[in-house]
Amino acid sequence: MNYLGHVLNHLRKDLRLEWRSRDSINGMLFFSLLVVVVFSMAFDPTASASRQIAGGIVWVAILFAATTALNQSWTRELRNDVMDAQRLAPSPASALFLGKALANMIFVLAVEAILAPLFTIFYNLHAVGPGWLLALIMPLGTWALVVNGTFFAALGIRTRNRELLLPLVLFPISIPALLAMVQATTGVLTAELDSIQLYLWVKVLISYDIIFTTVCLLLFETVLHAE
Amino acid sequence: MSRPTPTRIVTGLWFAATVIILVLGFHQAIFVAPMEATMGNVQRIFYYHVPSATAGLIFPYVNLIGSLAFLYWRRRDPLKALAADALALAAAEVTIVFTSIGLVTGMLWGKPVWGIWWTWDERLTTYLLLWLIYVSYFVVRRLSSTGQTQTLAAILSIFAGIDVPIVYMSIRWWRTQHPSPVFFGGPDSGLDPSMRPAFFLNFAGWIMWGVFITAFRYALERRRQVAEQNAALHAIEASLEIPHQ
């Protein structure tokens, strides 16, 4: 079986497991909704400046929601010595990682698909700049969070206080990506950035994604066999 | 006290030289160097801030090299890998200390001179990120299960090494407020000759101190590793002595 076959197998497995219990998605959805409401209390959405901060708030909400899902994405591998089976399986370790990262990506994108209209409603948003660019920025930014998040969640499988470790390690490393995605989203919503700067942030996101996807794929085998 | 070995002699001399240089540097920085025209005596913190900040940028690379060496030797030569990990750990601790000092002295200098404690320009943000990433490095080391600790920490060190330059560049595109470089900034920059002894003495002294502390911590960690290995060997041998019925 070729590499893509292995990746798709892992992806199918994770999607199927998630579909049976729907823990992750339900938790994420409700959590995101709560975050939206809390932020609406904290930052008045009716003020004229709400368009300026909406980009940042969306991404913080997605960051927190994704963290809750990523934390549990590897726990299903811990029961019944599944991790040992994964280590012995003939598929390359990076295929396991990629499959799981893609599954997490699908879950977070599903949550975003519900979160984005909610934000538009609660903040009365409409993009003043090129709105179609958001269809590019959202997946790129989400991938940046998901790929590193899946990797660091795997890093923390056998640590005690696993749920605490993921945000502590993920947030500092993700700062450049967060900056780029927030700047790009705000640039699209407010049209205050000229197109060169806006595309610059999109390019920063793309390069961040490429660099860290490569690093994660290369290093995952070491993490899997860390013991 | 056992017979002085070459290592101990060198260590003693290095330590003595470091202390002498630091004392001379203190004298120069506080009493001899002239008062700066615009900032006054507050500027003297510069002689401590710049060496600490620079050391905080050198030792992460020592940590990265140690981590890469650890990953390389992990399966090929475990004993060398252990030594590499001890170096990585020592360098990481020294990084956090120097980075913390750099951040605090920078803030103490910034408030009277710029009027602000903090700003999110590329240098300060990258520095804070460096500090945060190395704190997370220690969290990983502490929370991970034994046996995995060194590998996971080494991997995080690689991520840190890749991420910090990216942070720097991305925030540079965002804004800049840090004073322009004193040394390579252009025709008007450069340190006044009367300030040079104070600066270079402190710079050399604090880097030497960092090297000394790293070496000391490395030796400490190596002793801890050897003690752990001996204890494990002792336990294995004890388990082999269980009498059969």
Image: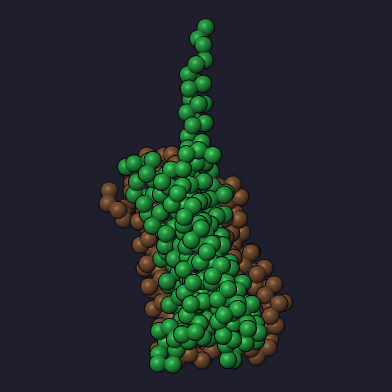
Percent position (x, y) of residue A125? 59, 85
**What residue is rendered at 57% in x and 49% in y?**
B142
Q: Nearer the viewer, residue B13 or A48?
A: B13
As displayed, is residue A38 above or below residue B144? below
Residue B10 visible to the viewer: yes
Q: In the image, residue A186 lies at what x, y percent?
A: 53, 84
Is residue A178 depicted above or below A78 in this figure?
A: below
In depth, the one of A124 and A159 nearer the eye is A159
Considering depth in this image, is B107 or A71 the residue closer to the camera? B107
* Direction from residue B227 to residue B111 in the image, left or right: right
Residue A56 in sight from this viewpoint: no
Q: Is residue B123 left or right of residue B44?
A: left
Q: Look at the image and tell me in which quarter the C terminus of chain A lies.
A: top left
Q: Position of residue B203 (x, y in %)?
A: 48, 71
The residue depicted at 48 percent of the width and 25 percent of the height is: B236
Left or right for A22, reference A138: right
Residue extending furthest top? B245
Chain shown brown: that is: A
- Among the chains pictured, the one given green colouring is B
